[in-house]
């Protein structure tokens, strides 16, 4: 059973560019959440998708957007990249409304130069 | 506004001894708490969780204690092993509304080093 998979694993972009990160949730899970983890910090919640809609959003600007597809996979898009967007981006999958753990992918390391 | 805090950036213990990692929270709406372990270049791996209706949960060498009145939880690892060396994150979730449990609020993490 494949767990949560993310692609790509590493990415280097230039300021002002746009980036798309991808995530496939664990089999059987219906909810995908995205987190940003800066160096030396804990992961920060960006947003959550369920039934192809954004359900919750953290304190991130509109430059961060996402999408969920009918097969539950998800994309995170970041426009007008800033140097401060350099971080590890983590995708987590879970079951909606359940008190169970979220499973994380290995992350995408984004470097903005 | 740091709703979940891990005030010890690092902890060093000897193999075979107990490791105690602490976490404090401020949001009284949190009702589900989790500990994750993270190695470099990997995503966080779930360790153990506890619901607010309990004060203790055990899983092998790992035990989590919850003190709701103090808004404090701790993770005990007994005995500690060198392979436990990693960054440990405390996380919390609030259940108001069906969609809320997917949103986790994390602490800053504690680097645990277990020496042979």
Image: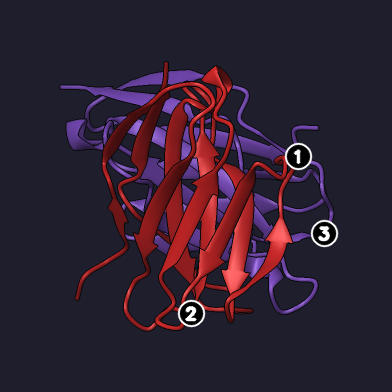
The residue where tag 1 is placed is B3
Q: Which mark is residue A30?
A: 2
Q: Are marks 2 and 1 in contact (CB under 8 Å)?
A: no
Q: Are marks 2 and 3 in contact (CB under 8 Å)?
A: no
Say which colour chain A has: red
Q: Which mark is residue A35?
A: none
Between A59 and B103, the one lying in front of the other is A59
Estimate how packed mark 3 is, as few (under 14), some (14 to 19) or many (20 or more) residues with alpha carbons within 10 Å: few
Quadrant in the picture for residue A73: bottom left
Between A25 and B42, the one lying in front of the other is A25
Estimate how packed mark 1 is, as few (under 14), some (14 to 19) or many (20 or more) residues with alpha carbons within 10 Å: some
Q: Of tags 2 and 1, which is closer to the observer? A: 2
| Residue B104 visible in the displayed image | no
Chain of the residue where label 3 is placed in the rendered structure: B
Quadrant in the picture for residue A19: top left
The residue where tag 3 is placed is B29
**Percent coordinates x, y for residue A1 in the rendering:** 19, 76
Between A70 and B3, the one lying in front of the other is A70
Chain letter of the purple region: B
Please report whichever mark, 3 or 1, sits nearer to the chain's N-terminal start: 1
**Percent coordinates x, y for residue B51 in the rendering:** 63, 67
Q: Which residue: 40% across, 49% down?
A: A21
**Percent coordinates x, y for residue B86 in the rendering:** 32, 32
* Image-based side of B4 in relation to A52, left or right: right
Estimate how packed mark 2 is, as few (under 14), some (14 to 19) or many (20 or more) residues with alpha carbons within 10 Å: many
**Percent coordinates x, y for residue B82 in the rendering:** 19, 30
Q: Secondary structure at mark 2?
A: loop
* Image-based side of B50 in relation to A56, left or right: left
Chain of the residue where label 2 is placed in the rendered structure: A
The way the protein has been coloured in the rendering is: by chain
Q: Which residue: 57% across, 35% down?
A: B22
């Amino acid at each position: 059973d494949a767990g949560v998979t993310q692609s790509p694993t590493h990415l280097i972009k230039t300021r002002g560019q746009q980036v798309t990160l991808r995530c496939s949730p664990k089999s059987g899970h219906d909810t995908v959440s995205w987190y940003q983890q800066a160096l030396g910090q804990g992961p920060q919640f960006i947003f959550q998708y369920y039934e192809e809609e954004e359900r919750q959003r953290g304190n991130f600007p509109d430059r961060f957007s996402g999408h969920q597809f009918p097969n539950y996979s998800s994309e995170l898009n970041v426009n007008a990249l800033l140097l401060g967007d350099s971080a590890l981006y983590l995708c987590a999958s879970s079951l909606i409304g359940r008190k169970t753990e979220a499973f994380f992918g290995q992350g995408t390391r984004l470097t903005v130069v | 506004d740091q709703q979940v805090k891990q005030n010890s950036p690092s902890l060093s213990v000897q193999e075979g001894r107990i490791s105690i990692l602490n976490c404090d929270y401020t949001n009284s709406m949190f009702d589900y708490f989790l500990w994750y372990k993270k190695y470099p270049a990997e995503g966080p791996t779930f360790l153990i969780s506890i619901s607010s209706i309990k004060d203790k949960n055990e899983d092998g060498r790992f035990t989590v204690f919850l003190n709701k009145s103090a808004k404090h939880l701790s993770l005990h690892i007994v005995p500690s092993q060198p392979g436990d060396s990693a960054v440990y994150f405390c996380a919390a979730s609030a259940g108001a509304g069906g969609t809320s449990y997917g949103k986790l609020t994390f602490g800053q993490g504690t680097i645990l080093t277990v020496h042979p």
